[in-house]
Image (cartoon, rainbow, N blue to C red):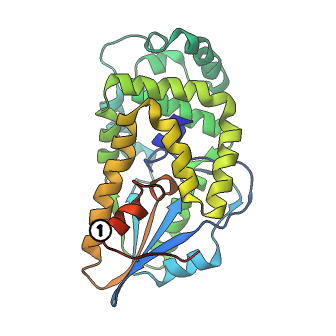
Amino acid sequence: MIMRSLAACLCLLFAVSVHGPGRAAPAAWVVRDADTQITLFGTIHALPAGTDWLAPAVAARLDAADTLVVEAVIPDDPAVLAPMVTRLGTATAGKPLAARLPRASRERLRRLVAETGVPMATLDGMKTWLAAITLADASLAKAGISAANGVEPALLARARAAAKPIIGLETAAEQLGFLDGLPEVDQRIMLAATIDDAATARADADAALALWQKGDVDGIARDLAEEAKASPTLRRVLLTDRNRRWADWVVGVMKRPGAVFVAVGAAHLGGPDGLLAMLKARGLVVERVG
């Protein structure tokens, strides 16, 4: 599950996926002082159609905020992002995708390609990170899971309907750059994990959903820490370095009056190097409100 968990940290891709409709009641946290209130809400970036997750308490906190903050404001039109992805993700030379894998993963790659319908020639022409993302995204689509049904589109639509300002902590270009800058060895770990985990995707997703519904971000963090042992670099680049920058951003915002609703992937919040712990280490009081 390492690929799904770590790549989940980038909102332009997807997050821990869940299967089946039903009401989720994920938690929120708040940091405040006399004239500033920042709500922190852990999201799931890709969901099946019909998942009912927007609890009244969460909606109320968003409605009361002056500004919505997300990881990145991704263009609604895929054609806007596609040229950037193509430019960064095209392999000008290199081995076929199967040759970048351990022998034990090559047959599983063949089966996954057949199941998802992604042409092998297309994958061969991609850098390893983009091939991994493409296969993971195709697997989710086959399971009926889409970023269009995720948490962020609903939050963005609600904020836009209320004419609230919306800002991103990062840009789409920055998020793609995190992946493109990974050493090839770590890109190949991503790829192998994506392929090897495909058979357990539903069980992994159901387990993650159960934790999210309980607001157990520390449980999500513990699972991620175990999975990420295969690539400390992936964990640092996609998770901890970003958490550190975001914690500094929150500290800066606390110096100005207002109410802000911050929605980032749930994998970012818990654990000793999660966003909540980093804020506490910077002297802020973090209170669970859901």
Of the residues shown, which amino acid type is indicated by label 1? Arg
Q: Nearer the viewer, residue 264 or 233?
A: 233
Question: Is residue 116 in view?
Answer: yes
Residue 252 image-quadrant placement:
bottom left
Q: Quadrant of the N terminus?
A: top right
Q: Nearer the viewer, residue 84 or 265?
A: 265
Q: Is residue 177 left or right of residue 74?
A: left
| Residue ID at (65%, 44%) | 205
Residue 57 image-quadrant placement:
bottom right
Q: Is residue 128 above or below residue 98?
A: below
Which x, y percent locates residue 100? 43, 14
Residue under label 1, please give it.
282
Q: Nearer the viewer, residue 271 or 143?
A: 271
Label 1: few (<14), some (14–19) or many (≥20) C-alpha neighbours in 10 Å? few
Q: Quadrant of the C terminus?
A: bottom right
Which x, y percent locates residue 173? 30, 45
| Residue ID at (51%, 57%) | 266
Q: Secondary structure at mark 1?
A: loop
Which x, y percent locates residue 219? 58, 53
Q: Is residue 58 above or below residue 156?
A: below
Which x, y percent locates residue 198? 63, 29
Q: Is residue 75 above or below residue 257?
A: above
Q: Is residue 61 left or right of residue 84?
A: right
Residue 276 image-quadrant placement:
bottom left
